[in-house]
Image (cartoon, grey):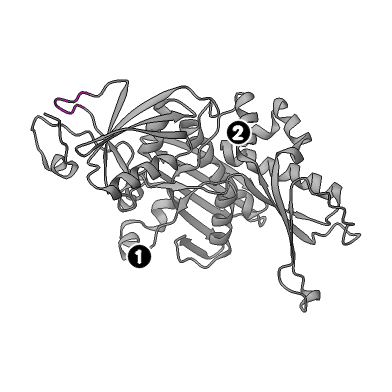
Amino acid sequence: MALMLDIKKLLAVAGGALLLSALVGAAQAFTVEQLFEAEVEVSGQNDDARRKAFAAALWDVLVKVTGDRSVPSRPEVQALFRGADKLVQQFQYREIETPLDAAAPAVDTLSFDVGTDVNVDASVESGEPTHVLWIQFAPETVERHLSRLGIALWGKERPETLVWLAVEDGRQRYLLGTSSDTEIHEELVSVAQQRGVPILLPVMDVADRTAVRFADVRGNFVQPVWDASRRYGVESILAGNLTRTVSGGWQAQWTLHRRGNTSSWRVQSTAITAGLLSGVEGVASVLSRELAVGYYGTEIGRTLLTIHDVDAIADYSDVVAYLRGLSLVKEVMVERVNEGRLTVALQLRGNPDDLQRTIALGDTLIKLRDVAGYEPTNRVLQYAYLP
């Protein structure tokens, strides 16, 4: 008789023959869609300015898709910068509005497909930026080059990091929250987007203000921050102190808590953006070491998954669409559908361990272990669908 599993019943079972493992990774996953895009300010639209902008944008993209700030500086990567134009899929100019030209439209857009011969003279003789150049690189081409160089890629499925930030700016002392209307809030969100690092700020409602005080974050007291973070369901917590120095610069001190491990670092800078960027890039460095895939472009054969509790056509559609949307999955082939169980064969750009780590970032599928009468094997991974 075929084994039928009901995940909701399993969660209620205590001490029975069926033993359901805990969810591997309770954190919320966030899909970063614009990993291969970047914007660069330029002082003109001529060929030379465009080539330089392509290289600058590629620097940002390489950091974003690997999570490693050192990648663009590696000797083996320099050839990619020399041929950055060959990696570009499309680009678009947007005019920067200036106070002296208030009558002009706020946005003047010029779009080109790569390969178009565009010869436009520099719009001004000075070096002041006049346009923002948006550039999109070809994902598969960039992935193929990095894979050939043995550089790991960090997929678009990334865990959110909850940021507790204590800001001390002269007499102003506060914890940054989602509704904070400050330059620091705007800059933190901006640099996180630029680096492809999903962040979450506390709402700072009554519950948060009761659980965590400014002094707790400022003094790096771990327990209050951990306790207050439980409601957000994250596994990555970044606690930071941002302090304006006597000289007018900024000192930033950061501590990242991730699955029982702690990393700390600090930086001093003249600009607030650099201090905030140091926190975001520290998170990217830690998470990418854990989640990046070293042979992203290599197909390694089929991996079989059996997903239980797929009871309706809508469930079937949701599961297949979810798997097809994962960065690591190149192809999804349905093997069989039988009495609430869906078995699929996946063609991966990585190995099964990478796949399991990626699935664990979300809450669509829950991994099953030690299921009586249906022992998991290395050949078939067992999951249950949580609609």
Please name the amino acid that badge 2 sits on.
Glu
- Residue position for label 1: 205
Quarter of the image with the N terminus is top left
The residue located at (80%, 45%) in the rendering is 52
Residue 169 visible here: no
Residue 291, image x, y percentages:
46, 33
- Span shown in magenta: 370-375
Helix, strand or loop status at disc 1? loop
Query: What is the number of callouts on the image?
Result: 2
Q: Nearer the viewer, residue 373 or 283?
A: 373
Residue 229, image x, y percentages:
34, 50
For label 1, count other residues whose C-alpha is less than 10 Å away and answer few (under 14), some (14-19) or many (20+). Answer: few
**Of tags 2 and 1, which is closer to the observer?**
2
- Residue position for label 2: 143
Residue 277 visible here: yes
Image vertical order of residue 206 relative to residue 374, above or below: below
Residue 187, image x, y percentages:
58, 58
* 32 sits left or right of 146 in the view: left
Residue 199, image x, y percentages:
47, 51
